[in-house]
Image: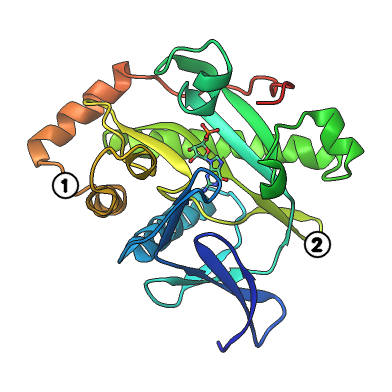
Amino acid sequence: MKQGKLLYAGKAKSVYRTDTRETLIVQFRDDITAFDGGKKDTLKNKGRYNAGVSAFFFEYLEKHGVKTHYLQMLDENRMAVRTLSMIPLEVIVRNVAAGSIVRNYPFREGTKLDPPVVVIDFKDDSRHDPMLNEDLIIALKLATPAELRKIKKISLEINRLLFTLLAKQGILLVDFKIEFGRQGKTIRLGDEISMDSMRLWDKKTKESLDKDVYRFNKGDVMTTYNRVARRIMTGAARPAAAKKKTVAASRKGAGSPGRAAKPKTKKR
Ligand code: 5GP
């Protein structure tokens, strides 16, 4: 597969054309940003950790019946994907209150959200990704009601699958953001699922294992990304004795995610 012209450069990824219309290449760069690009750095190896974790999750989800854009890894940073027409929505699924939901609503950080809360934002940096509701999504013609129902259903299924998978590795899936696109009439998961787009806590210590380490200067973010990537992909970084205990703890821990709550309609 030949890498062609740059199609789009985002804050941490670049998308290239290839010699076939149906296929694109996503390059995970070493750039990291937070607060709408207000904080920026380039950190060696960051791209490959996120690429590896994203590929791992895409493969896992595909194996469990979720349609994604993922085709294959080309090298440690580059992923071949199906060309999608992206829908400018950011779907956020929350199992535990943290981040903006705590800043904007009277939730205490760490409160379990059962059923999980699904929030959909308009992907528009210039407007700071305002929260949408179903009426706005339809009025803006961003998706049809049937597509929206499907997007919510797939998002909750992804949540169920990843919550369970991560719990086995001693990790609490607090929340995550995903994006979808159309391939003809088929809705597929696009973009990435990585430490940049998820909030992950160690189940026992509640230590952050994601971009919050960078956002809030909680430590060395690359050490965290390296450790958590290994932990997610291989179950490594936990002594064998701790594994059984963590699995047992997960059964009485935050529980498993239930069904969708209605999306909030107020702006954040
Ligand atoms: P919050 O709304 O609390 O800031 O974010 C909720 C979850 O969605 C977090 O896991 C966060 O990392 C992710 N998220 C929200 N907006 C974005 C975004 O614009 N880009 C990325 N990569 N993740 C986001």
Nearest the viewer among 34 and 115 is 34
Q: Where in the figure is residue 47, as x and y percent of width and height?
A: 39, 64
Whether 1 is drawn above or below 126: the answer is: below
Q: Which residue is mark 1?
A: 237
Q: Amino acid at mark 2?
A: Gly
Rendered location of residue 233, percent (x, y): 31, 53
The quadrant holding residue 258 is: top right
**Which residue sits at x=88%, y=37%?**
138
Q: Where does residue 77 sit, x and y in percent of width and height? A: 41, 71
Of all residues, the one furthest to the front in this rendering is 38
> Could you say whether the residue bearing mark 2 is in a helix, strand or loop?
loop
Identify the residue at image location x=43%, y=34%: 163
Looking at the picture, which amino acid does disc 1 mark?
Ala
State whether residue 231 appears in this view: yes
- Residue that mark 2 sits on: 184
Q: Earlier in the sequence, mark 1 or mark 2?
A: 2
Instruction: Please give the count of numbered marks on the rendered protein.
Output: 2
Q: What separation in Å lies between label 1 and label 2 (alpha carbons)? A: 42 Å
Could you tell whether 219 is left or right of 67 in the image?
Answer: left
- Residue 249 as seen in the image, left or right of residue 213: left
Which residue does the image show at 36% across and 65% down from the upper left? 48
- Res. 177 image quadrant: top right
Q: Could you tell me which quadrant the C terminus lies in?
A: top right
> Counting other residues with Cα less than 10 Å from the Cα at mark 1, is it few (<14), some (14-19), or many (20 or more)?
few
The location of residue 97, given as percent across then percent down, is: 47, 21
